Amino acid sequence: MHELDLHHIFELGLILVMIAAGITAIAKKFRQPYPIALVIVGTFIGLVHIPVLEPLKEFITEGEIFNFVIITLFLPALLGEAALKLPFSHLKENKAPILALAFGGTLLSFIIIGFSAIWFLDFSIPAAFVLAALMSATDPVSVLSIFKSVGVNKRLATVIEGESLFNDGLAVVLFKISAFYLLTYLELGVEGAGLGLWEFFKVISLGLIIGGALGYGFSQLTKYYDDYPLEIIFSIILFYGSFLLAESIHASGVIAVVVAALILGNYGAKIGMSPATKLNINNFWEVTALLANSLVFLMVGLEITVIDLTDKWWLIIVSILIVLIARSIAVYSSLLFIKSFPTSWKHVINWGGLKGSLSIALVLSLPRDFTGREEILIIAFSVVLFSLVVQGLSIKPLLSWLGVNKKEEGYQEYEQLIARAHRFETGILEIMKVKKNLFITEAISKDLILQYEQELSKLQNETELLFQKYPDLKEKQKTNLQKHSLYAQHDAIDQLLKEEIISNEVAEKEKDEITNSLVKLEDTH
């Protein structure tokens, strides 16, 4: 690769953003999961020789570049954004399944994959358990992106988010222990087992302490400012600062940033953020996460193409089967004693245990002389590709087949009433237009318009009966109408300001009131 200057790096980055944004926009237009589209297109770009994009491919597929971008640049932002918007009350309500999956399920999967790799793949002990760590955790970037795009039940979404955020931190800890300390601990016998457990709890505990302390400190800081651009900067410093500080003292950066973001998004938002600040911080991180996700999945597709899979198909197939079986055993076993947890949800969580960019970034961080590195690399890339494309594409049909993402009661009937009402209203407007243009007499058009108006009256009565039967449906429609009204009011204030009818001071005051009303609607629904 030719030597790159900063200007050229910026150009390559901008090209990557443009490609990622274009693919994401098209996927969203057709209501398809954009992460999968990005991986597929990235893989295609990597396989096909496109002269204009060759420098970009060479730059992105550099192991150190990919590792830095995924782990240091994007991971804190993606984890922080997800945890920031996750209500602590929802976590508390679902703590049993989240803890069972994030800790019990991850450890069980780690053990099953590790021993299976030794027995069936003839891996050394360190290589087997490094692979196990990589394949045991669901990748938060992949899981959250896919499930947000297909839509799932709120409680199920909370469990999925909680598992992916916490078991990710656990998997990184297990990866580092397996890669660098496992043989030493095994040689020391009982003493080594004790040292291993101490290292495990130390890394997690320090991550919790750092995240908790910084999250609390920055939450207190927000009390002294009502300035959302400044508070957004505080959140950036918090997410990246907690991650980098924890990593610098060999603690879990992932756990630190998740805990810090949870505290800021719940405690900090409660004691120190105005509604306008909360809305703007959430909007900022939502945009950041969309950009980061788009780039991550495109990069994963590009990175996958550099691996030579020739004559490795048996290894890949056996590995995928091992990972799928281990995931199934881990999910169903860990949720066995959780009451009131639907079986259909267990199926979704099992099949939705996607692997992604973090697994690839971690395996690329292995030392070049690590025994079994190439085999682990091949398996990791293959499982990630299978996970994102095969499992990712089949999640939406699975949700529909299991009835997990079915719409609330009465909603389909409501949609039918709305469709029919829209038909008749459009018909009346068209009759009026044709009547005017073609000089149709009142006598001819009156009967048809009266017929449509009678149909509309019937539909209005049916809608009222439906709302009486399903009060929640009426509340939801009322909330949607209120939101549209508030957005229109916001635009109206902007227009008055633009025409210099009102001052900046009055406009800001009115906008703050509108924003506060919007936040209240979000909080109560």
Image (cartoon, grey):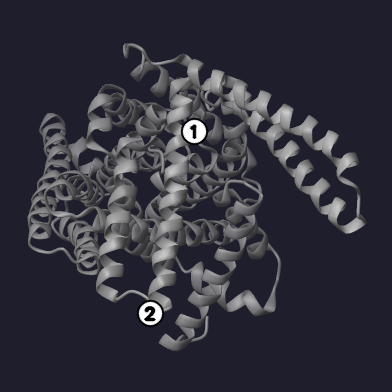
Taking the image as shown, residue 520 lies to the left or right of residue 128, namely left
Specify the label residue 500 is tagged with.
2
2 or 1: mark nearer the eye: 2
Q: Which residue is mark 1?
A: 352
| Picture residue at 46% right of the left edge, 81% below the top | 9
Marks 2/1: CA–CA distance = 53 Å
What secondary structure is found at the residue carrying circle 1? loop
Locate residue 134, reporting x and y percent: 39, 43
Residue 386 in view of the camera: yes
Residue 372 in view of the camera: no
* Residue type highlighted by circle 1: Gly
| Picture residue at 37% right of the left edge, 53% below the top | 362
Q: Is residue 129 above or below residue 79?
A: above
Q: Nearer the viewer, residue 292 or 362?
A: 292
Specify the label residue 37 is tagged with.
none
Looking at marks 2 and 1 on the same chain, the residue that comes earlier in the sequence is marked by 1
Locate residue 136, reporting x and y percent: 39, 35
